[in-house]
Amino acid sequence: MVEQGDVVKVNGVELPLLVVSGNAYNKSGAAILCPVVKNASEATLKVFVENEQISGYALCDNIRHLDIAKRGYSGKGHIPLTKMILILDMIQSLFDYV
């Protein structure tokens, strides 16, 4: 099972993905993820993330839902909680009331 803050490489998806869904949800085998790209010059909501295996920008306004248990995936490390809080705040801002 993946955990919130994990970076994964999902089979059939070119970019690494950051798991943003909570651990209770991830137990289903599905996850909500943000792609991590090298260059995000025109992205609106982005956060720079890095660990020992990846570095790039998590695109917070490009969230995806995937059944990663069916697709298969491999781990690419984890990012710090401080970065996850910032990313989750940006995602929440997409759904705030006017």
Image (tube, rainbow, N blue to C red):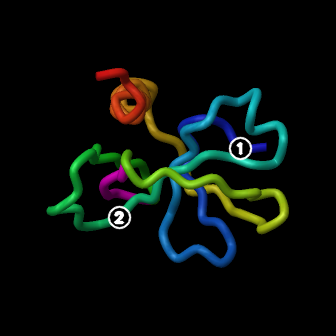
Write down the region rendered in magenta.
54-59
The part of the image, by quadrant, that contains residue 71 is bottom right
Q: Is residue 51 above or below residue 42?
A: above
Q: Amino acid at mark 1?
A: Val
Residue of label 2: 37
Q: In the orientation shown, which residue stands out farthest toward the top?
A: 97
* Residue drawn at (48%, 70%) of the image: 15
Q: Secondary structure at mark 2?
A: strand
Residue 67, x across and y down, in percent:
76, 57
Looking at marks 1 and 2 on the same chain, the residue that comes earlier in the sequence is marked by: 1
Q: Secondary structure at mark 1?
A: loop
Q: Is residue 21 left or right of residue 78?
A: right
Q: Amino acid at mark 2?
A: Val
Decide: few, some or many residues near mark 1? Use Cα within 10 Å; few <14, some 14-19, many ≥20: many
Residue 11, x across and y down, in percent:
69, 73
Query: Which quadrant of the figure contains the C terminus?
Result: top left
* Residue drawn at (54%, 39%) of the image: 20
Residue of label 1: 2
How many numbered discs sit on the rendered protein? 2
Residue 37 magenta-drawn? Answer: no
